[in-house]
Image (cartoon, rainbow, N blue to C red):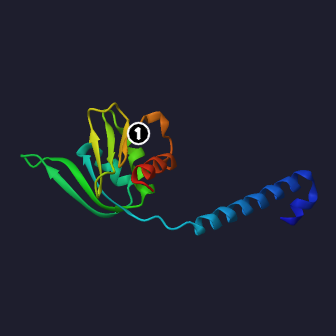
Amino acid sequence: MRDICRRDALGALVCAALVFTAQRRAAVASARAAEPPEQPLAFEWRVPASQVEIVRGNLIYEGQEQPQTDGRGIPVLVVFVGLALLAYLAKAILALQRQIAYGGVVVDTRTDPVRITHDKALDAGVILIVGKDGTQTIERNEISDPAQLIEALGKALGK
């Protein structure tokens, strides 16, 4: 690498970029190590049968699935119950939101565990967060990555 740095100005620029990137990664890792670890959040998520695979593929959690059937034994929804980091819940909610053709997702933080449901009455893709201090509606286009949803959920949870 030193040979590249010594050859010409372009090599010097490449070396400077590599050094800057390494320093930035070290600073980010140090800042993350100083943060207190996130505590898992107890949740209950009622997922319609047609959307179960989306949640299974995107949610990392400790807990169980409880299938709910209609009178004929046909599965109509699955209740996911357990503990998950807020980041994993946010990722799974956004993955589901992108796939919903009708209705939206309601996250009710007033209960323990936090209750997540699908509501057909909402516009497609809307995430409705019911906070301890009121209700906040977040439209589909306002949230594009999990960090934004984590922030909104954290406010609703009082964190």
Q: Using residue 92 as the reference point, say whether residue 9 is left or right of it.
A: right
Residue at position x 27%, y 38% in the image: 119
Quadrant showing the C terminus: bottom left
Extreme left residue here?
A: 71
Q: Name the quadrant of the N terminus.
A: bottom right
Dot 1 surroundings within 10 Å: few (below 14), some, or many (20 or more)?
Answer: few
- Residue placed under numbered mark 1 in the picture: 98
Kind of element beneath mark 1: helix
For the residue pair 110 and 78, the one nearer the viewer reads as: 110
Residue sticking out furthest to the front: 133
Q: Position of residue 43 (x, y in %)?
A: 31, 57
The residue nearer to you, when weighing 37 against 103, is: 37
Q: Position of residue 71 (x, y in %)?
A: 6, 46
The image quarter containing residue 14 is bottom right
Question: Which residue is at a point 23% across and 46% down the rendered structure image?
Answer: 49
Say if 52 sits above or below 16 in the image.
above
Q: What amino acid type is highlighted by mark number 1?
A: Arg
Q: Residue at x 31, y 49 (%)?
A: 53
